[in-house]
């Protein structure tokens, strides 16, 4: 069949003819953004630079958070082992026995578990993932010069930085960072005298996370406004790539749920500092009755999980969007069921707000209320399954390019299935009686939103690295990174299901004293070794990332993957305002791969008469 | 404030849309606290008391300030310089009075034996009205900026300056709406 597609001869000159002229370059205001080192690299208002700032800060925190997990995994895997060699780093948190064997102090074990959760959930998988890719891709893919408010965007990064600085400082307190779990339930979080980390550590934790919420809100308001208001000519909502749909809905979820967390924190601050009794009821500490009366600890849990549950979708939806885009590009096929994908994202977002109490089945909420939450929790499996079906169908009979980006995208689907299925177990309040607060839960959420979200992020990093740095990452190292990571990640978390089914509780310092847990000593050692192996493979990524920045293969064409979306029409050297002249107009959706025998048709290519006729014939 | 990529095709200015979204975010924060109030109230051990009358006085002042700022905005559009400046200053005074009245209302509650500590019922009133007052302070900052602009700059209804005043106006109306919501909530949810 001779092609019915009429391609413009030259992309650049065509965009100058057909594109939308917003007179952006008439004003020359672009230069003031990048005129010196400070405005270009530090207080940058350019979304592409802010994206890199988010990514590299996220990487910093990922290393710290992962290193913490290694420290407490050492304790769990080798409880009798000598870790006095860690003393130069951890100082007094290593307690030395009389015969010179160093072991982790119990307080610091809890602090590490708490910080690992807080850092990974908020700093890495929220800011590092959504912050990076929303910033990089929203203006580029919708066809905008920058975010709606570059100033607020810059503030968003610097509030995140401040939040990180405060949290980082809390690691060095003489009483240690907060140690009551990343959920910060009262009374451990509400009473400064409750544990060593509950005093100054908790205060800094609260300050840090409040700053973090400001960052998320400033970012989210910008993302939503940009998507709704600054799309280029012809870019209707139904022509948006699925990445943008995912970031857009993620931002909405954040805007609606993070303020609720602040409300919860506000009452907590009053309980801590002003002596109110929102969360505190009759409590004795050290045999002394406190004068708090009439509070409800459950109230905090409701407020926390009203954010906490949507938060897991804030983490996983951007990964889903990235995976959809990367799979379509690398399977050379349109994403299967585009509209079903969008409606699934919307359904997941809606349902995420009415399932929070499934985190509280065992906390004494009314069992009849639990039923309601069980039903809606299980319904989330439907849009999730639709998405999985569509990803697999997109791959089916595709001409798949197996590169690092697409391998991590496929790995994401694998992880999402493995972790998603156990979610159906845990969503049942009756099964939860056995499984709640066990390693089964740890395995479930690490696979479905920890590892899976990381895979989505890695996929995005490998795929859009050329867009960020004008060079490619090393492909061989990337594939070694993938295979090493997927095998070691399963090796860490798969065995945890068996621990959990046997009732091994999470957050315990040691399992030596109980028969039903001490039998898993070998398995715990295996998990710890796997965790170290997994960490080693991530070092490979970091080396690859920074090495490729200077020595990677140079990007020579604008559109190296022959993709359809608008970011690949911008110059290789990212410029302020993204397009040197006019903004391209959009004439079709983002997934015209393999149409009428054409490998890919970019979004700015107009629909010719012949194509329109052929389209109609296709429908009938 | 820069607005790169502002397309003339926009039906609503991006910053105005951003402000609406922020208002939605603030609303969620207050919605969460009033929900917490209901949940805690239904658990029993709940002190019932009458709100101090000063809250009703402050409500009137805040409502009036919304009216004056709206009139100020239309006077600005029509170029009535004296009216615009006068109403702007009046709004600022009314806004400040509102915060002072709220403070006095808290003092009245304290004097009536309803401290911040103790039964959560009055604590909630302190926290909710206090959080609202904090947001009003934010609005007052933008009003002060508007007043400085109003008296220092020539009165010209350029799109940029109209937008600035409109953003202040939108936020101020939202503060008004939020307080009405809280007051009705306190009165009806006894």
Image: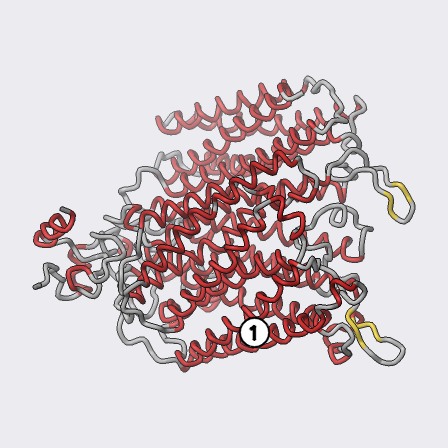
User: Position of A142 compared to B140: left or right?
Assistant: left
User: Position of A70 compared to B21: left or right?
Assistant: right
| Residue drawn at (88%, 80%) of the image | A99
Crowdedness near tag 1: few (<14), some (14–19) or many (≥20) residues, C-alpha within 10 Å:
many
Judging depth in this view, the residue of B182 and B42 nearest the camera is: B42
Residue B117, relative to residue A545: is it above or below? above
Q: Quick one: SS at disc 1?
A: helix
Across the whole image, how many numbered discs are drawn on residues? 1
Q: Quadrant of residue A282?
A: top right
Judging depth in this view, the residue of B152 and B26 nearest the camera is: B26
**Percent from the top left, x then y, of residue A73?**
68, 70
| Residue drawn at (58%, 77%) of the image | A533
| Residue drawn at (32%, 54%) of the image | A241
| Residue drawn at (63%, 44%) of the image | A430
- In the rendered image, is residue A125 in sight? no
Q: Mark 1 sits on what residue? A: A534
């Amino acid at each position: 069949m001779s092609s019915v597609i009429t391609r413009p001869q030259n992309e650049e000159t065509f965009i100058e003819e057909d594109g939308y002229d917003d007179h952006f370059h008439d004003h020359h205001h672009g230069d003031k953004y990048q005129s010196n080192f400070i405005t270009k690299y530090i207080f940058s208002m350019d979304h592409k630079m802010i994206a890199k700032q988010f990514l590299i800060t996220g990487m910093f925190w990922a290393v710290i958070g992962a290193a913490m997990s290694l420290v407490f995994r050492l304790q769990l895997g080798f409880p009798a082992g000598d870790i006095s060699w860690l003393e130069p780093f951890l100082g007094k948190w290593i307690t030395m026995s009389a015969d010179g064997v160093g072991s982790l102090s119990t307080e610091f074990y809890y602090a590490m578990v708490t910080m690992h959760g807080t850092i990974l959930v908020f700093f890495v998988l929220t800011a590092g993932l959504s912050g990076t890719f929303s910033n990089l891709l929203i203006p580029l893919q919708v066809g905008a010069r920058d975010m709606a408010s570059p100033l607020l965007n810059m503030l968003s990064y610097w509030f995140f930085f401040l939040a990180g600085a405060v949290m980082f400082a809390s690691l060095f307190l003489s009483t240690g960072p907060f140690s009551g779990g990343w959920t910060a339930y009262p009374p451990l979080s509400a009473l400064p005298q409750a544990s060593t980390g509950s005093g100054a550590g908790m205060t800094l934790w609260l300050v840090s996370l409040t700053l973090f919420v400001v960052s998320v809100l400033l970012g989210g308001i910008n993302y939503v406004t940009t998507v709704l208001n600054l799309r280029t000519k012809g870019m209707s909502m139904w022509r948006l790539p699925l990445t943008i749909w995912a970031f857009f809905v993620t931002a909405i979820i954040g805007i609606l749920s993070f303020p609720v967390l602040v409300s919860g924190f506000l009452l907590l601050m009053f309980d801590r500092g002003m002596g109110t009794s929102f969360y505190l009821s009759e409590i004795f500490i050290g045999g002394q009755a406190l004068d708090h009366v009439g509070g409800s600890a459950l109230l905090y849990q409701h407020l926390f999980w009203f954010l906490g549950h949507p938060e897991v979708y804030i983490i996983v939806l951007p990964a889903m969007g990235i995976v959809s885009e990367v799979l379509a590009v690398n399977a050379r096929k349109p994403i299967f069921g585009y509209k079903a994908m969008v409606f699934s994202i919307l359904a997941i977002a809606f349902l995420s707000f009415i399932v929070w109490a499934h985190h509280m089945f065992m906390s004494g909420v009314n069992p009849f209320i639990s039923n309601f939450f069980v039903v809606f929790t299980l319904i989330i499996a439907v849009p999730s399954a639709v998405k999985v079906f569509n990803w697999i169908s997109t791959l089916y009979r595709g001409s798949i390019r197996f590169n690092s980006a697409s391998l991590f995208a496929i790995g994401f689907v694998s992880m999402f299935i493995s972790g998603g299925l156990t979610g159906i177990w845990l969503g049942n309040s009756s099964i939860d009686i056995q499984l709640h607060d066990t390693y089964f839960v740890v395995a479930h959420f690490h696979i479905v939103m920890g590892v899976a979200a990381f895979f989505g992020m890695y996929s995005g990093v490998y795929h859009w690295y050329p867009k960020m740095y004008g060079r490619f990452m090393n492909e061989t190292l990337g594939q070694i990174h993938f295979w090493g990571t997927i095998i070691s990640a399963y090796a860490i978390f798969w065995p945890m299901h068996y621990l959990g089914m046997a009732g091994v509780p999470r957050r315990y310092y040691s399992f030596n004293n109980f028969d039903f847990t001490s039998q898993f000593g070998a398995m715990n050692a295996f998990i710890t070794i796997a965790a170290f192996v997994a960490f080693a493979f991530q070092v490979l990524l970091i080396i690859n990332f920074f090495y490729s920045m200077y020595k990677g293969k140079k990007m020579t064409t604008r559109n190296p993957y022959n993709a359809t979306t608008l970011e690949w029409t911008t110059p290789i050297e990212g410029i302020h305002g993204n397009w040197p002249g006019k903004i391209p107009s959009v004439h079709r959706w983002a997934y015209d791969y393999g149409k009428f025998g054409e490998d890919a048709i970019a979004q700015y290519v107009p629909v010719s008469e012949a194509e329109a006729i052929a389209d109609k014939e296709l429908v009938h | 404030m820069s607005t790169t990529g502002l397309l003339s095709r926009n039906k609503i200015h991006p910053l105005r849309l951003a402000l609406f979204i922020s208002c939605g975010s603030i609303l969620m924060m207050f919605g969460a606290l009033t929900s917490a109030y209901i949940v805690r109230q239904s658990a029993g051990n709940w002190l019932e008391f009458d709100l101090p009358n000063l809250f009703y006085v402050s409500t009137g002042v805040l409502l009036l300030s919304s009216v004056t700022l709206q009139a100020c905005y239309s006077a600005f559009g029509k170029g009535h310089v004296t009216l615009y400046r006068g109403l702007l200053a009046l709004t600022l005074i009314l806004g400040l009075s509102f915060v002072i009245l709220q403070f006095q209302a808290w003092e009245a509650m304290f004097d009536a034996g309803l401290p911040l500590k103790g039964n959560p019922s009055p604590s909630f009133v302190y926290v909710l009205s206090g959080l609202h007052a904090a947001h009003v302070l934010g609005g007052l900052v933008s009003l002060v900026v508007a007043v400085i602009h109003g008296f220092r700059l020539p009165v010209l209804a350029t799109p940029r300056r109209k937008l600035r005043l409109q953003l202040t106006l939108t936020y101020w109306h939202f503060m008004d709406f939020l307080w009405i919501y809280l007051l009705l909530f306190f009165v009806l949810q006894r």
